[in-house]
Image (cartoon, grey):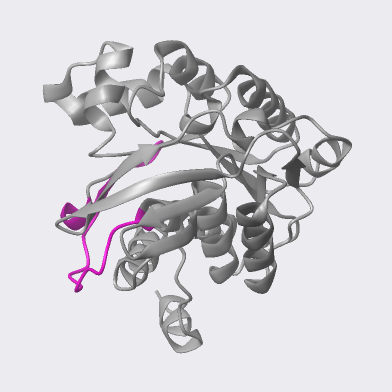
């Protein structure tokens, strides 16, 4: 298996009451993809400031390729206030930051042709600058054969029907959580009380290979061309749930790229996410012994 997988979108600091922690879906996804045995590369933009340079150094220390992390001289590095309520995060997302202005580059043109897969979200498309760049990159990679995963992020007011529709159109997989479902259903005119039927109908109507729904401790459901696969939850002691969805997506993509059937891929993805929630932060280091056990699933 050759070629990278890309985590595209918001790169930022999560500001917890106890201090700042590197975060954002591209970092979490790319890092967990690396832990799952892939070559994860974040694609984002940081400010030319202390938070940005510290974040860049941390990514490199974690072994991530930072060649597609741009530096902005005008806008600051992104940050998000995070309050934990019963272990679940509540976010305050700051506006007009560097990742809102992700720009097209020759490096993107080059990597789009060799990427095995990518994960992009709706939150990172809140500004027209980043939206245009992200959609161009996803279209180019998808045309070259990459598995393009839409990670639905229903956050505050940063989503619209148009962004969701355009993103679904260029994806092969759609992943959303129980937290996202009410806003997703409202935006697309779906019946929130008939979730499974609506998600299966969406998969078929939009010619998607996968619609994945995650519900924390209740497990996950994978809507696939071979049928609906239920993924049982793993009972673990939860430190926090930040990054769990990114880990699930990374694990699922890694498993499918290795040729695993949907049921085994779902089990691996759930197990990787369970290892993440046992540790604080969205991108905790998982010990080699634990990763080896995951590899036996």
Q: Relative to the observer, which residue lies in front, 190 or 280?
A: 280
Q: Quadrant of the N terminus?
A: bottom right
Q: Relative to the observer, which residue lies in front, 166 or 280?
A: 280
Identify which residue is drawn at 75% across, 47% down: 68
Residue 232 belongs to the span the image colors magenta: yes
* Residue 149, image x, y percentages: 52, 39
From the viewer's perspective, tell me whether residue 27 is left or right of residue 265: right
From the viewer's perspective, tell me whether residue 87 is left or right of residue 59: left
Residue furthest to the bottom: 289
* Residue 13 appearing in the image: yes
Position above or below: 57 against 29: below
Determine the image quadrant of residue 73: top right
Identify which residue is drawn at 31% across, 59% down: 17
Determine the image quadrant of residue 77: top right
From the viewer's perspective, tell me whether residue 52 is left or right of residue 171: right
From the viewer's perspective, tell me whether residue 262 is left or right of residue 23: left
Q: Relative to the observer, which residue lies in front, 118 or 24?
A: 24
* Residue 95, image x, y percentages: 49, 30
* Residue 223 appearing in the image: no
Magenta stretch?
216-244
Residue furthest to the left: 193
Q: Relative to the observer, which residue lies in front, 217 or 26?
A: 26
* Residue 151, image x, y percentages: 45, 38
Q: Quadrant of the C terminus?
A: bottom left
* Residue 267, image x, y percentages: 34, 63
């Amino acid at each position: 298996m050759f070629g990278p997988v890309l985590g595209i979108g918001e790169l930022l600091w999560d500001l917890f009451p106890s201090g700042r922690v590197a975060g954002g879906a591209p970092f979490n996804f790319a890092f967990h993809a690396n832990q799952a045995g892939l070559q994860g590369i974040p694609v984002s933009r940081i400010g030319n400031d202390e938070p940005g340079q510290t974040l860049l150094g941390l990514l490199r220390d974690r072994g991530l390729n930072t060649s597609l992390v741009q530096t902005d001289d005008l806008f600051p590095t992104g940050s998000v206030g995070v309050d934990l309520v019963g272990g679940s995060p509540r976010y305050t997302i700051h506006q007009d930051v560097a990742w809102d202005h992700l720009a097209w580059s020759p490096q993107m043109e080059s990597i789009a042709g060799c990427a095995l897969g990518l994960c992009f979200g709706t939150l990172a498309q809140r500004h027209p600058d980043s939206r245009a760049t992200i959609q161009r990159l996803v279209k180019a990679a998808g045309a070259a054969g990459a598995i393009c995963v839409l990670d639905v992020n229903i956050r505050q007011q940063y989503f619209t029907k148009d962004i969701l529709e355009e993103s679904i159109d260029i994806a092969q997989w759609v992943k959303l959580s129980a937290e996202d479902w009410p806003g997703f259903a409202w935006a697309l005119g779906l019946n929130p009380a008939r979730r499974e039927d609506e998600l299966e109908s969406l998969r078929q109507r939009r010619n998607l290979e996968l619609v994945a729904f995650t519900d924390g401790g209740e497990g996950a459901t994978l809507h696939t061309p071979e049928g609906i696969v239920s993924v049982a939850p793993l009972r673990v002691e939860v430190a926090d749930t930040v990054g769990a969805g990114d880990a699930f997506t990374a694990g699922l993509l890694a498993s499918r790229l290795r040729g695993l059937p949907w049921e085994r891929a779902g089990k691996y993805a759930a197990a990787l996410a369970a290892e993440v929630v046992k540790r604080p932060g969205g991108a905790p280091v998982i010990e080699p012994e634990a990763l080896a056990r995951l590899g036996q699933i």
